[in-house]
Image (tube, rainbow, N blue to C red):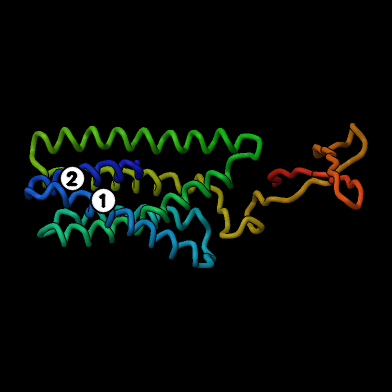
Amino acid sequence: LASGVFGSVEVFAIAYAEDRDAAAAAGPLLAAFAAGSLLGGLAYGAVAWRSSLRRRFPVTVGALTAGVALLPLAGGLPGLAALLALAGAAVAPMLITAFTLVEGIVPAHRLTEGLTWATLSVNLSYAGSTAIAGAVIGGAGARAGAVVPIVAGCAALLVVIAGARLLPAIEATPSASPQAWSPRSCSVTSAARRCSTSTRSTSARAGRRSVRICTGRWTR
């Protein structure tokens, strides 16, 4: 649901620019939204967070919702660009937190599947929000399109708050999480084997060497 904000915001920005007879300004408006996300992601990644992901996730979704709630206040193209940059600052932190949660919850052997489902949900909500925003704008005008990302953000925030208790309290660092990454010890006996090993030989001028590779998994 939160990713439904992205598509509807983009449709709204383009319609807003066209409504003001400045279709060429649509590109800079979308660039402002993306730039805000870039800066927000850099700032989010630079902080050594002590709070758990479960607590940060509702905060990031709430920040995104609060940002798009200000879009109807835009008094012109420069104002809308500033508000888009402000709202975009919450996009990357929200996505980072969401996908890190998936990585911490899903078992290692199903991580690819889990991330695929998460990506699919992002794409579906994005596509659905663009269609809804287009229909709303076509029927009620460009300014009415700002309602769609606000509704999508509020709905996402309610779902996240309601389901927050179901999420494990994954800490900021993988080593402190309930599912910490640790290498499995290699066993030479097939019955007690806990990791897959492979041996490869490489040639060098000095001779030959063997490299043994041991894989790991998420352990509780």
Which of the two residues, 207 or 69, is positioned nearer the viewer here?
A: 207
Which of the two residues, 191 or 7, is positioned nearer the viewer here?
A: 7
Residue 83 visible to an observer of this rendering: yes
Residue 119 on image: x %, y %:
45, 37
Residue beneath the point at 15% across and 54% down: 72
Image quadrant in which you'd find residue 112 = top right
Q: Are marks 2 and 1 in contact (CB under 8 Å)?
A: yes
With respect to residue 107, does 169 lie above or below?
A: below
Residue 147 on image: x %, y %:
18, 45
Asked whether, in this view, residue 213 is left or right of residue 41, the answer is right
Which of the two residues, 34 or 190, is positioned nearer the viewer here?
A: 34
With respect to residue 164, does 193 lie above or below?
A: above
Question: Looking at the image, which residue sits at the far front?
Answer: 205
Image quadrant in which you'd find residue 86 = bottom left
Secondary element under disc 2, as helix, strand or loop, is helix
The quarter of the picture where the N terminus appears is top left
Residue 216 on image: x %, y %:
74, 44
Which of the two residues, 209 or 124, is positioned nearer the viewer here?
A: 209
Residue beneath the point at 42% across and 56% down: 93
Residue beneath the point at 71% across and 43% down: 217
Residue 66 visible to an observer of this rendering: no
Residue beneath the point at 69% across and 50% down: 181
Query: Of the numbered discs in the image, which one, if any, rests on residue 38?
Result: none
Amino acid identity at mark 1:
Leu
Residue carrying label 1: 30
Within 10 Å of disc 1 (Cα), the crowding (few <14, some 14-19, many 20+) is many
Amino acid identity at mark 2:
Ile
Q: Sequence order check: which comes first, mark 2 or mark 1?
A: 2
Residue 80 on image: x %, y %:
18, 57
Residue carrying label 2: 14
Asked whether, in this view, residue 180 is left or right of residue 93, the answer is right
Secondary element under disc 1, as helix, strand or loop, is helix
